Amino acid sequence: MTAPHSLTIPGLETVYDLLATAIDEAGPDKSELLLVKLALLNANALGDPELFRAHLASAAADL
């Protein structure tokens, strides 16, 4: 279930920081829209609906 080009731990930390900043900047009224748009852009970049489904299931587990 891992993409061919996985991020390193420092890369994941950078992505986390970028995402947290973008969510803060979007504010509570727009953060859901930001995340949906981001998910759609990343699903398109993945190019694989089943891989996206697997990622979605992993993200939704144990919320």
Image: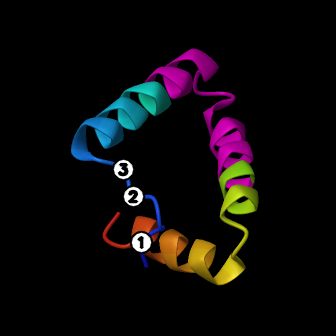
Q: Secondary structure at mark 1?
A: loop
Q: Which residue is mark 2?
A: 6
Residue, far top: 25
Residue highlighted by disc 1: 2
Residue 38 position (above or below residue 61): above
Where residue 57 appears, as percent x and y from the top left, is 48, 76
State which region is magenta: 21-40
Residue at 58%, 27% (x, y): give it: 28
Q: Residues within 10 Å of mark 1 (few under 14, many from 20)?
A: few
Residue 31 versus residue 2 in the image, above or below: above
Rendered residue at 38%/36% (across/down): 16
Going from N to C along the chain, the mark reached first, 3 or 1, is 1
Q: State left or right for residue 61 relative to residue 53.
A: left
Q: Are marks 3 and 1 in contact (CB under 8 Å)?
A: no
Name the residue located 23 percent from the left edge and 44 percent from the top edge: 9
Dominant secondary structure (helix, strand or loop) of the stretch shown in magenta: helix
Q: Measure the C-alpha gap from mark 1 to mark 2.
A: 7 Å
42 in the magenta segment: no
Residue type highlighted by circle 3: Leu
Q: Circle 3 sits on which residue?
A: 7
